[in-house]
Amino acid sequence: MNKLQLSIAMGDYDRTRPIHDGRVQIDGVQPITFLQSPEEMFFNAFRHETCDVSELSLSSYCVSLTRDNPPYIGIPVFLSRAFRHSSVYVRADRGINGPQDLIGRRIGIAEYQLTANVWVRSILSDAGVQPHQIHWIRGGMDKPGRPEKIKLTLPENVQIENAPEGATLNQMLADGEIDGFIGPRWPRCYHEGHPQVRRLWQDGFAAARQWHAETDMFPIMHVLGVRRRLAEQHPWLPGALLKAFTQAKNMVQEALADTSATKVSMPFVEDVLALTKDMSKDLWSYGVTPNVKTLAYFLKNHQAQGLSPRLLDVQELFHPATNESYSL
């Protein structure tokens, strides 16, 4: 029997490399893998449906599910997760010391519907700051003119304006033309040590740990998707993908725990591993069941922010074959 040849787009992570280099095989599949940046993967997926299997922005995927003929069906493989308290940058000279101080401010974003931005707005909303209370400036971070990947119809009270022609959000923040920036990547002026640009939560590590203690959630950024027509033609495929990507994640987590020689170029790995185990025995879990609370919270906020015209149910995000598994 010939294997099914599939193109797979995913990020270059420890948890995807065993798929890319062949240490973990996908049952019945001969993969052609592409290691790409999130921006490239998501643009290709939602503009051109380039690959058979693709890592997807959770937010963009949810938007697609409320429209006709969504191209992908999700697999509960969450290749990117991140606490987002470190994703809010502000001018240090504007008297912005907490979430409430963002009300009425001009805040830059690369795209409104980015998953990281949905999570930050959710955290701000819980702190009493609603999206319509902020004046959003949309533009490219380092190159002018970045459009939304997906056309949006937002509530009328949400204020979004495009950055001036030729302007970048990084330069606008450095020059004080905007009061802050929210996004998954740090603005270059912050990375380069601009004296008037800092994080809103200056100890993002501590803020995230406290938030996790209060909510028991670890934000999901990206999900794996497979073309719907392929899942219909090959009903074994979604389960095979979940199995293989889970094996890849387990493989690298076991390697990371072997601290005889650290597997990443970072000191204190064993200390961070111990801390994350205290937070959760399986912080980076795949599958639907252990992530229902996190996904339901995201879907509620996705609708509240005007990105979903209806409240999506967690179960409709994923292929039915991945909602349960066999046991011995």
Image (spheres, rainbow, N blue to C red):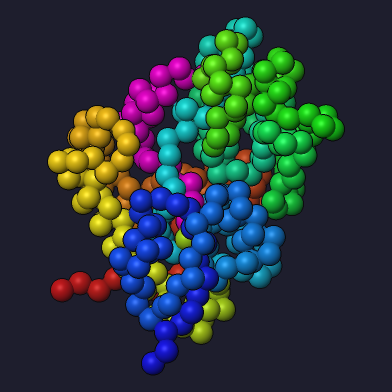
Quadrant where the C terminus lies?
bottom left
Residue 212 location (% of width, % of height)? 35, 33
Q: Is residue 128 magenta?
A: no
Position of 221 with respect to 27 (left or right) is: right
Residue 10 location (% of width, % of height)? 49, 58
Point 28% across, 53% down: residue: 252
Q: Residue furthest right?
A: 165
In this rendering, the answer to whether 278 lies above or below 293 is above
Quadrant where the N terminus lies?
bottom left
In this rendering, the answer to whether 213 lies above or below 70 is above
Position of 296 with respect to 165 (left or right) is: left
The one nearer the camera, 110 or 219, is 110
The one nearer the camera, 170 or 241, is 170
Observer able to see residue 238: yes
Q: Residue furthest bottom?
A: 1
Observer able to see residue 130: no
Point 70% across, 53% down: residue: 150
Position of 283 with respect to 45 (left or right) is: left
The one nearer the camera, 301 or 258, is 258
Quadrant of the rendered structure where residue 49 is? bottom right
Residue 236 location (% of width, % of height)? 40, 80
The number of numbered badges drawn on the structure is: 0
Quadrant of the rendered structure where residue 213 is? top left
Q: Which residues are magenta?
A: 200-223
Q: Is residue 207 magenta?
A: yes
Point 72% across, 36% down: residue: 143
Point 47% across, 60% down: residue: 224
Residue 58 location (% of width, % of height)? 53, 52
In this rendering, the answer to whether 6 lies above or below 255 is below
